[in-house]
Image: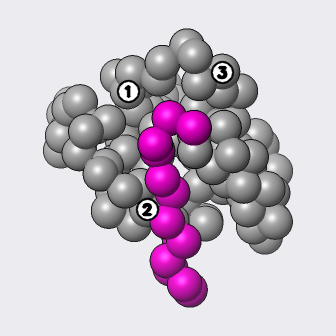
Amino acid sequence: MADELVAILKEENATLRERIRQLETLLTPEDVDVPLEWQLANAERRIFSALTRLDVVSKEMLYQALYSDRLDLDREPDCNAVESHVSKLRKKLRPFGVVIISKRFTGYSLMNRQQYAHTPPFPLTVVARHG
């Protein structure tokens, strides 16, 4: 009985890990080409990638994109950190004609987002459960 329970929990853990991986890929895709001349830091690259995915990205979503690998995400997001990163990113991208628009009470959007998003978001797949 205990062995069956351990097997079930391992399978559920694997399923949850896969779903998290898929969600993180949706939020911060790795297939977005960021020109080297933009000289973006990792945090700026994550924000830019997230902005290519949706018409409007909330501050909370950008916070998740920035810090999804941290273990202390149960605390309230520090949206000031997001605003600071977005401000720096705007300054770096302005000379290249890339514009980030603030959406009051909603979040941020990327002007002409379609030209930077190379693949559409993909649907989450369901990992089959055995037994």
- Total marks shown come to 3
Q: Residues within 10 Å of mark 1 (few under 14, many from 20)?
A: some
Q: Quadrant of the N terminus?
A: top left
The residue located at (20%, 32%) in the rendering is 119
x%, y% of residue 60? Answer: 61, 65
Image quarter of residue 43: top right
Q: Amino acid at mark 1?
A: Val
Q: What residue would you read off at disc 3?
A: 39
Between disc 1 and disc 3, whose residue precedes? 1
Q: Quadrant of the C terminus?
A: top left
| Up-down relation of residue 15 to residue 74 (above or below) | above
From mark 3 to mark 2, how far is it between C-alphas? 21 Å
From mark 2 to mark 1, how far is it between C-alphas? 16 Å
Q: Which mark is residue 109?
A: 2
| Up-down relation of residue 7 to residue 110 (above or below) | above
Between disc 3 and disc 2, whose residue precedes? 3
Magenta range: 95-107
